[in-house]
Amino acid sequence: MFTGITEDIGKVINITNSQLEIETCLDDIKIGDSVAVNGVCLTVVKISDNKISFDYSPTTSDITNISLLKKNAVVNLERALTLKTRLGGHIVSGHIDTNTTIIDIKKEDRFYFIFFKINEDIKKYIVKKGFISIDGISLTVAQNDNEKFSVTMIPETFNKTIFHTRKIGDIVNIELDVLAKYVEHMLNNENNKKEITFDFLKENGFC
């Protein structure tokens, strides 16, 4: 599990069709540890000095932007949280649901407004002021309609993640709010089709 708070911007040293090697300043990483790479939970399989390597599957290649990376590309990195970690973002699993495209980037005063295309996979989960993870960054939906949604980034987030390198047309990883997916699953279960009330939400652990 992760929080969606980027700890380091790593650099791709080498990438093949199944393995990724990244240079990072992060320490306290061991073989077998989970690290989020642009929001994708990957397992460390090799460590050499300040470089860490991961294997990634065909499924990961198909639904994330990992396979689009090139040598010297930069990536957001976050180590898995511990019981002592402050949950500064929101609960992020590192299991990417889909990807989408940046359609606009605007700067007003010191703040950045970034717009993304909405596809059918994510439309019903995008809620104003709801949680979303984009390339592993915990963000809040600012506005949305049937075709696009936006987030607002403070300078700290924009400059200390790979978003300061992003441009219109780039593909980003999307992880939707896991609580929303659980609610949907329960409501679609024939044995659980009940009216949504405060008691229902409380009974199922949502408040």
Image (spheres, rainbow, N blue to C red):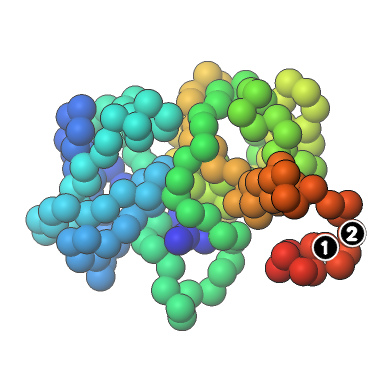
Identity of the residue furthest to the front in this view: 191
Q: Is residue 127 left or right of residue 121?
A: right
Q: Quadrant of the N terminus?
A: bottom left
Q: Residues within 10 Å of mark 2 (few under 14, many from 20)?
A: few
Give the numbered dot on residue 197.
Answer: 2
| Amino acid type, mark 2 | Thr
Q: Is residue 21 left or right of residue 148?
A: left
| Residue 100 vertical placement versus 48 (above, below) | above
Q: Position of residue 5 (x, y in %)?
A: 51, 58
Q: Position of residue 140 (x, y in %)?
A: 69, 48
Q: Secondary structure at mark 2?
A: loop
Residue appearing at x 52%, y 19% in the figure = 169
| Amino acid type, mark 1 | Phe
Q: How far apart, in angstroms, are the residues tagged by discs 2 and 1? A: 5 Å
Q: Are marks 2 and 1 in contact (CB under 8 Å)?
A: yes
What residue did someone put label 1 on?
Answer: 200
Q: Quadrant of the C terminus?
A: bottom right
Residue appearing at x 79%, y 69% in the figure = 202
In the picture, residue 88 is in which quadrant? bottom right
Q: Is residue 130 visible?
A: no
Q: Is residue 23 visible?
A: yes
